[in-house]
């Protein structure tokens, strides 16, 4: 093989590799840009929804529930629709209940709703409940003020000095301080007692 053919093959090989490399870079970068553009579109839609409604930061509601217990409800971001101003959508929702007997109950969730007429509350996503040495973790928590009921549901896990439990639904009656632990199917509630 002559040196001219060798040089020609080398140049063609380099050009082919460069073309493949450029195709790979532009194709790969194009995929990343599409993902970035989609994320930006979703964020813009969320911001548009927030800007279309009434928007507030660092919101605090103080009140007294149906049993005469004080509560403090805080939110990083709150919005409400003019058609239903009593329903406040919240992001970064935290509530502290001060019971007459001196007990303090803290509840938090990533998102939720507050009805400022009935004082009902909904906590969603990564819900955490703390009272003294007891803690409950779940997907959802609904506080029904007039019914004096707290309903915790979705991957419910509880920890206390007495033991641990898992269930699907946990109903807490505020009046008589009773607890109903339920499962959606025929499985048994799992409770581990510490002795």
Image (cartoon, rainbow, N blue to C red):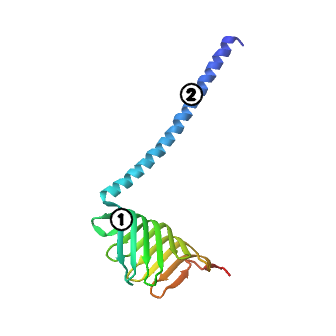
Quadrant in which residue 164 is drawn:
bottom right
Mark 2 element type: helix
List x then y, in percent, for residue 90. Answer: 39, 65
Q: Earlier in the sequence, mark 2 or mark 1?
A: 2
Q: Which residue position holds label 1?
A: 59
| Cα–Cα gap, marks 2 and 1 | 57 Å
Residue 58 visible here: yes
Picture residue at 32% right of the left edge, 56% below the top: 51
Quadrant in which residue 114 is drawn:
bottom left
94 and 192: which is toward the camera: 94
Residue furthest bottom in the image: 176
Picture residue at 48% right of the left edge, 80% below the top: 103
List x then y, in percent, for residue 64. Answer: 36, 79
List x then y, in percent, for residue 69. Answer: 40, 81
Q: Viewer-nearest of labels 2 and 1?
A: 1
Residue 187 visible here: no
Quadrant, the N terminus: top right
Specify the label residue 191 is tagged with: none
Picture residue at 39% right of the left edge, 80% below the top: 145
List x then y, in percent, for residue 160. Answer: 59, 77
Using a 10 Å C-alpha cutoff, classify the residue at mark 2 as few (fewer than 14 neighbours), some (14 to 19) or many (20 or more): few
Quadrant in which residue 163 is drawn:
bottom right
Q: Are marks 2 and 1 in contact (CB under 8 Å)?
A: no
Q: Which residue position holds label 2?
A: 19
Picture residue at 51% right of the left edge, 70% below the top: 128
């Amino acid at each position: 093989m002559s040196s001219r053919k060798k040089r020609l093959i080398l140049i063609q090989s380099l050009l082919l590799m460069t073309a493949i490399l450029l195709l790979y870079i532009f194709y790969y970068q194009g995929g990343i840009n599409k993902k970035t553009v989609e994320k930006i579109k979703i964020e813009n839609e969320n911001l548009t929804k927030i800007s279309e409604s009434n928007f507030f930061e660092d919101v605090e509601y103080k009140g007294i529930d149906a049993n005469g217990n004080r509560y403090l409800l805080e939110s990083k971001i709150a919005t409400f629709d003019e058609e239903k101003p009593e329903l406040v959508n919240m992001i970064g929702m935290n509530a502290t209940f001060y019971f007459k007997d001196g007990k303090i109950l803290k509840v938090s969730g990533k998102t939720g709703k507050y009805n400022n007429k009935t004082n009902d509350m909904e906590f969603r996503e990564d819900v955490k409940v703390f009272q003294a040495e007891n803690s409950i973790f779940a997907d959802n928590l609904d506080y029904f003020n007039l019914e004096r009921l707290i309903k915790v549901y979705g991957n419910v896990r509880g920890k206390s000095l007495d033991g641990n439990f898992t269930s699907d639904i946990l109903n807490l009656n505020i009046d008589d301080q009773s607890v109903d632990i339920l499962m959606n199917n025929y499985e048994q509630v799992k409770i581990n007692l510490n002795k």
